[in-house]
Image (spheres, coloured by chain):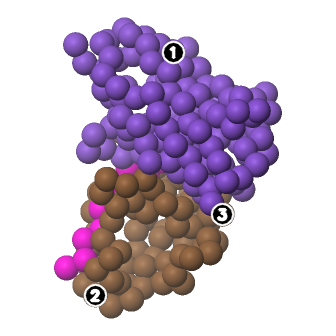
Amino acid sequence: EVQLVESGGGLVKPGGSLRLSCAASGFTFGTHSMNWVRQAPGKGLEWVSAIGSSGSSIYYADSVKGRFTISRENAKNSLYLQMNSLRAEDTAVYYCAREFSESFDYWGQGTLVTVSS
Amino acid sequence: QSVLTQPPSASGTPGQRITISCSGSSSNIGSNNVYWYQQFPGTAPKLLIYRNNQRPSGVPDRFSGSKSGTSASLAISGLRSEDEADYYCAAWDDSLSGRVFGGGTKLTVL
């Protein structure tokens, strides 16, 4: 059974940093691109970042470019999102999602990031 | 402001057929596949339609997708109370080099 479990969310002050993790199981992690998608409270979905199966292809939304860094460790079946210079507008539930045939076919349960003083 | 435009709300009665539209541009829907996701409150989104009109296993055939030019639609026939949820369209955008989502449509079953 495919499982994606995010962790690392919490309360952080504006300008602070946080590192999210996503532990994957139930599939061959190293053969899938992975993504982060976020959802601000009461708002819609916003794609954040993507990383190819080997880590060589990386994409970011303009809203996080230069502040967030996506990475992965295939040997540990893990996906990460390093978030720096956090802003109030980064407050959201962050989901990791497996990519299959261009779609996001499996999602984690999400981890809440709150940026507030 | 979302790159893909969806109506914020839609409604229908049980048994009815409804459609949800998703409007984009030549850099996203016009040149790439469209995907639809269903989300219930407090839960993660679920893939509903991939590659414009394909259903993952387990998705009822009451759900169908279509695409024409720079627009796409999700149709739900035989509407049921359990279909009440938020629906999002998504596509790759060549200009942005990233995924874009619609703002979401809240479906109410009256």
Q: Determine whether the residue tagged by mark 1 lies in a helix, strand or loop.
A: loop
Report whether mark 3 lies on the same chain as mark 2.
yes
Percent position of residue B49, x then y: 57, 67
Report whether mark 1 lies on the same chain as mark 2.
no
Where is mark 3, residue-wise? Answer: B51
Where is mark 2, residue-wise? Answer: B14
> What residue is at 43 percent from the left and 13 percent from the top?
A17
Report whether mark 3 lies on the same chain as mark 1.
no
- Please tell me how crowded label 2 is: few (under 14), some (14-19), or many (20+) other residues with Cα within 10 Å: some
Q: Amino acid at mark 1?
A: Arg
Question: Which residue occupies the foreground of this view, A49 or B11?
Answer: A49
Q: Nearer the viewer, mark 3 or mark 1?
A: 1
In what quadrant of the picture does the N terminus of chain B appear? top left
Magenta highlight on residue B36: no
Marked residue chain, label 1? A
> What residue is at 26 percent from the left and 45 percent from the top?
A42
Where is mark 1, residue-wise? Answer: A67
Q: Determine whether the residue tagged by mark 3 lies in a helix, strand or loop.
A: loop
Label placed on residue A108:
none
Which colour is chain A painted?
A: purple
Say if residue B29 shows up in the picture. Answer: no
Which colour is chain B painted?
A: brown
> What residue is at 52 percent from the left and 67 percent from the top?
B48
Marked residue chain, label 2? B
Percent position of residue B58, x then y: 57, 76
Q: CA distance from mark 3 to mark 1?
A: 32 Å
Residue interval drawn in magenta:
B100-110
Q: CA distance from mark 1 to mark 2?
A: 47 Å
Marked residue chain, label 3? B
Percent position of residue B38, x then y: 43, 63
| In the depicted structure, whether residue B85 falls above or below residue B57 | above
Sequence-earlier tag: 3 or 2? 2
